[in-house]
């Protein structure tokens, strides 16, 4: 068990970090740092929590736990998506215990205070004289939908740059019509590692030799500059250059934006968006690179459109294909335990067993997530070892460096009182 670390000591580690190297062990193992992460990162920034198709009808809801916070995300009777603190205004009981469901009104299980889907208190029995129900609505949480992806912010004043992010990424995402999709599958796994190790693992392909199933559709040269391509990846890189030229012509003919926009650090809401080719037949991220659903998304008529990727700090990444969308949410549980929620979405009119095979849809990522969970568990054991010391990043791990830089910037701004 790690010893207590003061906030001043943490700030010293933040400002003393050697750029281009992994973080010091307490950033991954310390309970004090973990609690600070919940406060400074998850309590103050825009956090991905799901998608609009997860709450398709009025009264549908999901609940999300972030440390001591619990948040209800639901669609109200006017079909708007809202978010509220999962706390009754009477004596604080949790209103909804299930991860998801549907409700007419929100009825507190303790004393039956009742709220409508807009958060207004509509029933409270045996209250005293002068009681004003309008003063006891549920406490709202800031919510933003970007092309159907849902983000919440627990801070009183959320980062304003979310509107700029939306303006940049929505032209990339909107053609895929996420709001016209439905959830085909959702799988939760708990990884035995710190949430930052889960994110760092996602942000590089230096380890992608450990993902043979994923490597059939994604090129093993992600993040590599041409001068860093070794002999083992040269054939794949040459194939990438050829297919990339083909796909660029297809994207431009179809009016699909494709150029990379990388703003992962130096701002509260770091992001990266780009459209990239897929290997081989190049239709989807499946075992044979062919579509998993014959019912394509949006107005697409051709399945071969590559992969529309989106990374957002601090807790998500997303793949938009011609036939489905995959979202990934990282939610911290403990210093050494992290929930990874993966959701597969297909067109709302696609029929399971007719238009799509759910096993084909999920198989690559289900296997890849299990492989990554093993990598993260090994990394967490390693950084917990007294012999661990920060090591240098490979040039191909530049996105890991961006993530670490962003994270430390946010801690510095919080601890140092900077805007």
Image (tube, grey):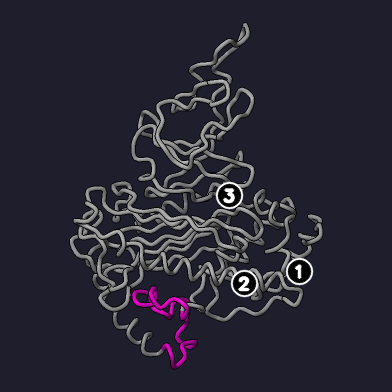
For label 1, the crowd category at 10 Å Cα-Cα, with few meaning under 14, some 14 to 19 and many 20 or more, is few
User: Secondary structure beneath disc 1?
Assistant: helix
Image: magenta residue range: 209-233
Q: Which mark is residue 16?
A: 1
Q: Position of residue 76 (x, y in %)?
A: 40, 31
Task: Judge left or right: residue 28 versus residue 345.
Answer: right
Residue pointed to by mark 3? 45
Q: Are marks 2 and 1 in contact (CB under 8 Å)?
A: no
Q: Earlier in the sequence, mark 2 or mark 1?
A: 1
**Residue behind mark 2:** 379
Q: Is residue 412 left or right of residue 131?
A: right
Look at 30% across and 55% down and name the residue there.
Answer: 176
Q: Looking at the picture, does residue 334 appear above or below residue 233?
A: above
Q: Nearer the viewer, mark 2 or mark 1?
A: 2
Q: Earlier in the sequence, mark 3 or mark 1?
A: 1
Real-space CA distance between mark 3 and mark 1, rounded to the nearest whole angstrom: 24 Å
Is residue 123 shown above or below 396? above
Image-based side of 351 in relation to 368, left or right: left
Q: Could you give the CA–CA distance between mark 2 and mark 1, rounded to whole angstroms? A: 22 Å
């Amino acid at each position: 068990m790690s010893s207590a670390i003061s906030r001043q000591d943490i700030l010293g580690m933040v400002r003393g970090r050697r750029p281009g190297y992994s973080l010091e062990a307490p950033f991954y193992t310390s309970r004090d740092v973990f609690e600070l992460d919940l406060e400074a990162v998850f309590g103050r920034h825009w956090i991905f929590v799901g998608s609009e198709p997860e709450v398709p009808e009025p009264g549908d809801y999901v609940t999300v736990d972030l440390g001591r916070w619990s948040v209800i995300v639901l669609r109200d009777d006017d079909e708007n998506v809202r978010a509220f603190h999962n706390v009754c205004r009477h004596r604080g009981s949790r209103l909804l215990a299930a991860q998801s469901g549907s409700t007419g009104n929100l009825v507190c299980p303790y004393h039956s205070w009742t709220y409508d889907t807009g958060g207004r208190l509509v029933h409270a029995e045996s209250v005293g004289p002068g009681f004003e129900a309008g003063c006891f609505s549920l406490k709202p949480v800031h919510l933003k939908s970007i092309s159907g992806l849902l983000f919440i912010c627990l801070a009183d004043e959320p980062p304003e740059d979310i509107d700029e992010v939306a303006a940049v990424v929505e032209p990339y995402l909107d053609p895929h019509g996420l709001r016209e999709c439905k959830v085909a599958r959702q799988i939760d796994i708990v990884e035995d590692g710190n949430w930052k190790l889960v994110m760092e693992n996602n942000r590089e392909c230096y380890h992608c030799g450990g993902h043979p199933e994923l490597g059939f559709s994604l090129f093993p040269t992600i993040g590599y500059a041409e001068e860093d391509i070794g002999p083992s990846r040269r054939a794949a890189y040459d194939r990438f250059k050829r297919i990339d030229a083909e796909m660029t012509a297809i994207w431009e003919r179809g009016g699909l934006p494709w150029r990379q926009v990388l703003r992962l650090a130096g701002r509260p809401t770091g992001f990266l968006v780009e459209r990239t080719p897929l290997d081989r037949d190049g239709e989807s991220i499946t075992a044979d690179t062919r579509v998993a659903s014959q019912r394509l998304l949006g107005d697409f008529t051709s399945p071969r459109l590559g992969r529309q990727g989106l990374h957002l700090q601090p807790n998500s990444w997303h793949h938009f294909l011609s036939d489905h969308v995959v979202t990934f949410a990282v939610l911290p549980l403990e210093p050494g335990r992290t929930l990874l929620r993966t959701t597969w979405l297909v067109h709302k009119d696609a029929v399971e067993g007719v238009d799509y095979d759910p096993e084909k849809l999920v198989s690559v990522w289900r296997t890849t997530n299990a492989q990554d969970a093993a990598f993260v568990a090994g990394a967490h054991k390693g950084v917990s070892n007294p012999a661990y010391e920060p090591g240098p990043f490979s040039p191909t791990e530049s996105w890991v460096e961006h993530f670490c830089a962003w994270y430390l910037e946010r801690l510095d701004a919080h601890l140092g009182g900077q805007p």
